[in-house]
Amino acid sequence: SYTAQSGIRTNQYIDGSYNLPPVKDMLDAYNPQIVIIMLGTNDASANRPAAQVSADLETIIAHVLWREGRPARTYRGAIPVLSTIPPKKDDLQDVQAYNAAIAALARKYKLPLIDFYGEIMKRRPNDWLGTLISGDGVHPSAGNAAADPYANNGEALRNSGLLLRCFLTVQKVKEIAVKALNLPFTG
């Protein structure tokens, strides 16, 4: 399936780039129930203004919610879930501006939000670089990604950015399954 692409910016995700089709085509092909949206890190690297990224995310949200068609668009039925982007070495001000815009969109559209940035800062406010974010200063660290997130009082969630991201995503999907989709979920 098409899920992510290293280096892609929000505007490129809309139009299709890096061998990915446009987002609306991916949604039409797979008809998902839940769509996790975590974009913006590469926009920060390209120095795109937070307002542009916010407008792009709003377009992506519209594609997740609505299927274009003739004579009229129809409700797609998918639930968009926004995620803040992680801290980025030498670029915290842009990241914070983007995350404020992402949180504002979640409030505006009453969408679920995964606060990846906030969870990183809660666990590692002063030493996230090299622990939860890899030494490149951009990507979540992958060490211990297969560890038990509940073992040793969640210690692995303080040391593996990839495990933390996956854990937060699973918890949010579980919450949506129970609250929005009325699915019985145990475990």
Image (cartoon, rainbow, N blue to C red):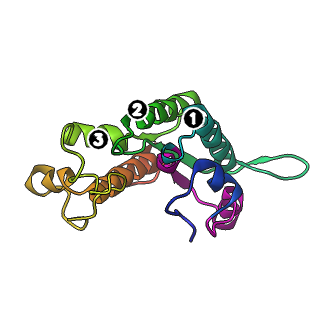
Q: Secondary structure at mark 1?
A: loop
Q: Residues within 10 Å of mark 3 (few under 14, many from 20)?
A: some
Q: In the depicted view, which residue is nearer to us: 108 or 185?
A: 108
Q: Taking 162 as reference, is 182 above or below it? A: above
Q: Taking 102 as reference, is 39 above or below it? A: below
Q: Residue 36 lies in magenta, yes or no? A: yes
Q: In the depicted view, which residue is nearer to us: 16 or 30?
A: 16
Q: Quadrant of residue 13?
A: bottom right
Q: Which residue is mark 2?
A: 93
Evaluate if marks 2 and 1 touch, with contact meaning CB atoms under 8 Å apart.
no
Of labels 3 and 2, earlier in sequence is: 2
Nearest-to-viewer mark from 3 and 1: 1
Please state if 187 lies on the left or on the right of 180 as rendered. Answer: left
In three-dimensional space, the C-alpha distance between marks 3 and 1, rounded to whole angstroms, equals: 24 Å
* Amino acid type for the residue under numbered disc 1: Pro
Please state if 7 lies on the left or on the right of 84 as rendered. Answer: right
Q: Secondary structure at mark 2?
A: helix
Q: Residues within 10 Å of mark 2 (few under 14, many from 20)?
A: few
Q: Which residue is mark 3?
A: 119
Please state if 173 lies on the left or on the right of 60 as rendered. Answer: left
Q: Which residue is mark 1?
A: 49
